[in-house]
Image: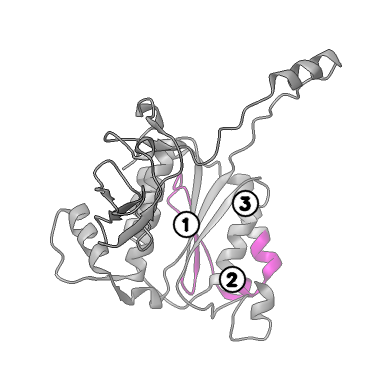
Amino acid sequence: MLLKMEILEEPNIVTGDPTHCQQCDAILSSTSVLEKEEEGDKYTWPCEFCECKNTGLDITPEEVPKGDSFDFVLTPARQESEEAEAEGAMEGETTPEKKEESKGMVVYCMDISGSMASSVRLSELQAQWRNARDRTSHPDNSISRLKAIKDAARRQLERMKIEYQNKQVALVTFGSTIYLWGDFHTYNAKSFTGNIINDYDGLIAAGREYATTMELGGLENTFEHLDRKIGNLRTEGCTALGPALAISAGIVAGSPISEVVLCTDGEPNTGVGNLDTPAGELFY
């Protein structure tokens, strides 16, 4: 669920610091029950979550939260000094204009090698969440590694589309062969296999070359194609992680503040960065 902060109403500020449960770290609220201790002015709070008895609380009525919603100010808001600005203006100083930074692009580099078909068991809470999300009851509580990263990437893209409609996103997948899908403004993926996967400079150059000709569109126009392709990914081959990562790095090399999101589970065993060779670790 994605909410805009502008829907929040004026906060109900509570004085003092929040009172934490000594055992589970829950915070004293307006629904908590305080018990006056027999001696002195201190209170005991039986935590409503873990039932821990928090004794010896030195708390005043003003410090007890009231109402359904309240805010503790943990750190005061930073305030700009108007006097300092005025002094700077008198001395002839000028405030430099803020330059708009490039938001860069995102490359999803996704592992589709055979090991990604292995299943992992979900915790009970995650299984319940999946059932609620899919509005169905799944027969078991397991999920393949590939399905896990596919779901995560698709959720990230959904959110990114809401926040940054013009964000440029490209897709690279790898098993034994590396496929450069881009953003699907063309459906012909570029594939890399054979000798080039052992050529680091050649892989970087291939990524750079694609970056100069790719003409990526924004997520507003490319989301459906990316989402559909990620949803249809299937496992194949070995793990050419190093070559795929080198191509991805080449793609973003000329675009400041860009990201490569690497989704993988296993050890690289094909091409540059092969961890079965002495030079494997040096690559990374």
Q: Nearer the viewer, residue 123 or 259?
A: 123
Residue found at x 36% / y 70%? 145
In which quarter of the view is residue 231 placed?
bottom left
Residue 4 horizontal side relative to residue 259, left or right: left
Which image quadrant: the N terminus? Answer: top left
**Occupied quadrant, residue 71:** top left
User: Within the magenta stretch, is there residue 184?
Assistant: yes
Residue tagged 2: 242
Category of crowding for the residue at label 3, using alpha-carbon neighbours closer than 10 angstroms: few (below 14), some (14–19), many (at least 20)? many
Q: Position of residue 80 (x, y in %)?
A: 66, 25
Question: Mark on residue 173?
Answer: none
Whether pointer 1 and pointer 3 mark residues with C-beta atoms closer than 8 Å, the reply is no
Q: Is residue 221 among the parts visible in the rendering?
A: no
Q: Give the amino acid type for the residue marked by disc 2 in the picture.
A: Gly
Q: Which residue in the structure is indicated by mark 3?
A: 252
| Residue 56 spot, x, y in % from top left | 38, 56
Which is more N-terminal, label 3 or label 2?
A: 2
Residue nearest the viewer, comparing 56 with 53: 56
* Vertical placement of residue 31 versus 119, above or below: above
How many other residues sit within 10 Å of disc 2, few (<14), some (14-19) or many (≥20)?
many
* Identity, as a three-letter code, of the amino acid under mark 3: Val
Q: Secondary structure at mark 1?
A: loop
Q: Residue at x 26, y 47 (%)?
A: 32
Residue assigned mark 1: 189
User: Is label 3 in a helix, a strand or a loop?
Assistant: helix
Residue 70 magenta-highlighted: no
Q: Nearer the viewer, mark 1 or mark 3?
A: 3
Q: Determine if residue 279 is in view.
A: yes
**How far is the residue under mark 1 from the one under mark 3?**
18 Å
In front here: 283 or 159? 159
- What span is colored magenta in the figure? 175-204
